[in-house]
Image (cartoon, rainbow, N blue to C red):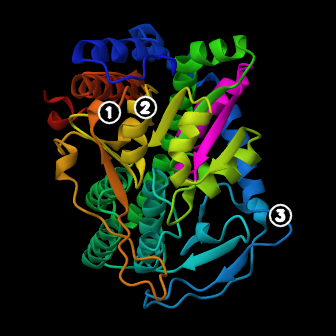
Amino acid sequence: MTADGDRSNAGDGAAEGERASRRQFFRVFGRQTVSSAGNVLAGVEALRRSSQEAIGDLVGGEEDPSRVRTPSDAPERSTPVAAHGATAYRSPYRFAGTTIEILDQTQLPARAAVLECAAASEVASAIRRGLVSGGPVLGQLVAYTLAAVLARNPERTAYARQQALVGAADTLRAARPTNRSLTVALERVLARAAVAELADPVSVPMAVLDEADRIAAEAAAEHARLGQLGAEAMRDAAQAAADQGRLMGVLMHGDQGPLTGGQIGPGVAVLQGLAGVGLPSHCWVTEGAPLLEGRRAAWQLAQLEIAHTLVPDTALGWLLHHRRVDVVMLRAEAVAGNGDVVAPLGSLVVARMCRAAGIPVVASAPLTLFDPVMGTGAQVPTELRLPAPNPGAGPRIDPALDVVPAELLDALLTDEGPLTAPLHVALHDAASVRASRLGTAASGADVAG
């Protein structure tokens, strides 16, 4: 799949032929490749280590992380504690026993400020205000938040524990109802707590913390696996670019680095995987107004020594006309049963423009984001952010997300390899393969046709 195809308005037959040729960008993985987890995950620890070191650099620098109060719309009060060193951070959040410390991403890269949240409502407020980016990291964050809720008062009665957990989960779920990682993590923690309550009530806090640890560890492994399989899928195109004496051009919309992935950013892991085999790429990063998510993405790419250039959202047309782009990578927040992708605001415009230009469009989507119960993207509720400051300019609206239809996507990059059309079939098949690989039972919804 290349960006050199016919860019004219051809007929339906020619368009379908172009689409088929673009899909050659992705290699079809045999069952033996997907099931060979040992080979695929051989580099997980190295990739995780490099990403952890990069995150340490991200929150380091000349200025130490500073403690600030929790967001102003949170009624709870935070208790100041002594500052930890920057190197203690290995992800955009930190579980501190009875509190959660969150890196305020809106102040990056100018300042590394840390929010100490003592209640679920404070974490939810930070999520709503965009102080922590979306993406898979939200699942890890809310799981540890529930662990902190129980850790603050481990002597609760069974009824009090249940009320505390359910209330905190409802508060967190309302902060980002469309983020699949968040909802799945809450369901997992509540289910684990219920089982522990029946077996040994005293063990409930430890069981909740153990489940949070599992969620974070599984995310790191899944993102590393996605990165290596995605890099393998793009290897031929990257090699073709290298043979032409240039770097493969990747347009990235939405932060896909460690700040949104936790310890490993799924999209950036693909670029790390290519660089690891001697095929570095050049990443064009859209700015991502109004939260300027792209600036933070570019900062992370710099820490990982990946060549990149930041471009304004409004310069997308110029970029496609004047520069070489081989593939577009979007970030998924959730994936519907038919393959529609819930993605950061602006993703729909990017997908449409690049598709019209004959450039393949893919989304980095760990299979934990797959929601078979959500049949299509049309079922996604409208989610609005708190409006950005707009003094003297009248009313303003800030939608949080776009829905990119499956027909605009050439592939989903997942931890079971790249999936291509028909996506609704490929997703259900991949979910079943993943369940078998991990030794877990897929629900009826997961494998329904």
- Residue drawn at x 45%, y 66% is 147
Part of the protein shown in magenta: 260-286
Query: Of residues 357 and 85, which is closer to you in this image?
Result: 357
- Residue drawn at x 31%, y 66% is 173
From the image, tell me which residue sits under label 2. Answer: 361
Point out the tag, 1 or 3, that comes first from the N-terminus. Answer: 3
**Magenta residue check for 261:** yes
- Residue drawn at x 43%, y 87% is 73
> Horizontal placement of 394 versus 16: left or right?
right
Count the marks: how many? 3
Point out the tag, 2 or 1, that comes first from the N-terminus. Answer: 2
Question: What's the CA distance linking mark 2 and mark 1?
Answer: 7 Å
Q: Residue 229, position in %: x, y?
A: 52, 22
Amino acid type shown at disc 2: Val
Question: What's the CA distance linking mark 3 and mark 2?
Answer: 35 Å
From the image, tell me which residue sits under label 3. Answer: 61
The residue carrying pointer 2 sits among few (fewer than 14), some (14 to 19) or many (20 or more) residues within 10 Å by Cα, namely many
Q: Residue 271, position in %: x, y?
A: 63, 32
Of helix, strand and loop, which one carries label 3?
loop
Q: Residue 171, position in %: x, y?
A: 32, 74
Amino acid type shown at disc 3: Gly
